Amino acid sequence: MSLTAFRTLGRSGLVVSPQALGTMTFGPGAWGADEATSRQIFQAYRAAGGNFIDTADIYSGGESERLVGQFIKEAGSRDDIVLATKFAFNGSASPLTATQAGGGNPNAGGAGAKNIHRALDASLKRLGTDYVDLYWMHIWDGVTPIEEIVQTLGDLVRAGKIRYYGLSDMPAWLAMKAATIAAERRVPGPIAIQVEYSLVARDVESEHVPAAREGGMGVMPWSPLAGGFLSGKYRRDDTKNTGRLSGPNPFGDSKFTDRNWEVLDTLKTVAAELDRPVAQVALSWVMARPGVTATIVGASKLEQLAGNIAATQVVLNDSQMARLNAASAPPASFSAGLTSPMIRRMVFGGHAVTGWGE
């Protein structure tokens, strides 16, 4: 199995693997892997030909960045690696304190220029490098003007401290505005967006995916297995499900809905036809979606990584893809309805017309 079916990320010259190794699991934590296991996962990913490593300043309190930097140094492969990290979340206060009034330095988080420079300098020190290939705004803070974000990140590209940048977890209009400002001013713009995208999280298809296509940005799904829900290890009739979704987690119990169980049933049927694990089929589906450049896959065990990589060999036929699409179809949105086949035929005198990039 190999991850060398390289492609460029968005409308850029950055060449990446179809799967990026997410390293949120590197270091201590509820779903973490110790240093030895993390090293094995990193080495196995590299041995499979993967070149795209994704981390963040807040993963394991900075330990993920430190371990990634150490592993890259040990391998002597910095020029071979596309190294991505993120800024925006505030690490100056504990999660409990941060949810209350006060408790931390407000300028140690967000997307303002002051924090971006502070966060990048700290990440570079932990990573043991003098540049990052792809710098992500981890989440929009809701207040910093996009003009400031584009200016600051563009200046860092020109200074050589980052090579490219992308936007994660933001409104679609913000990503499109960033791309437009950059194009009009002829300055570096975002080359990718990172969003939750899976068979049970398809709402991004309404606005985010079209915005990315129009703005020349690649789509990078995170949590393509919906926090493990699409691994098939959870059962509707089991009130004692164990795993990431059974305790405190970012999703709560939001994945355990009647609709999602029905999607999982269809997924299991298709997986049985292919004689493949459920998780591999779920990954294959999201990797084949229009606009998706690289899918972020994480692992806390070596066998999980092997399964993720094996998903690149799974091919869904038209019937299987159609059934998965139908079972997981998101509720109709206003914007999606504007370009529905029925409306388009009305516009074009009864003809079915396909647009660029569809």
Image (tube, rainbow, N blue to C red):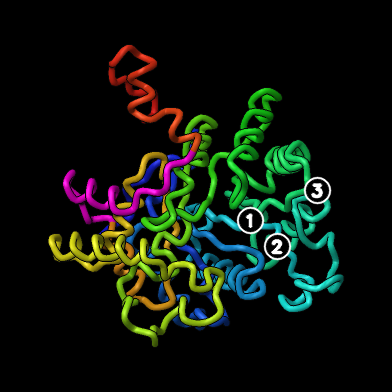
Camera-side mark, 3 or 2: 2
Say whether residue 314 is magenta. Answer: yes
Mark 3 neighbour density, 10 Å: few (under 14) some (14–19) many (20 or more): some
| Rendering coords of residue 309 (x, y %) | 31, 62
Q: Is the C-beta separation of discs 1 and 2 under 8 Å?
A: yes
Mark 1 neighbour density, 10 Å: few (under 14) some (14–19) many (20 or more): many
Can you tell which quarter of the image residue 260 is in?
A: bottom left
| Viewer-nearest residue: 354 or 17 | 354
- The amino acid type, in three-letter code, at marker 1 is His
Is 71 placed above or below 318 here? below
Marks 1 and 2 sit apart, C-alpha to C-alpha, by 7 Å
Magenta region: which residues?
Answer: 312-333
Q: Which of marks 3 and 2 is nearer the N terminus?
A: 2
Label at residue 138: 1
Instruction: Please tell me whether mark 3 sits on a helix, a strand or a loop.
Output: helix
Marks 3 and 2 sit apart, C-alpha to C-alpha, by 14 Å
Identified at 61% across, 39% down, the residue is 175
Return the residue at label 3.
113
| Rendering coords of residue 113 (x, y %) | 80, 48
**Number of numbered discs present?**
3
- The amino acid type, in three-letter code, at marker 3 is Ala
Q: Earlier in the sequence, mark 1 or mark 2?
A: 2
Is 266 placed above or below 192 here? below
Label at residue 24: none
| Rendering coords of residue 71 (x, y %) | 52, 70
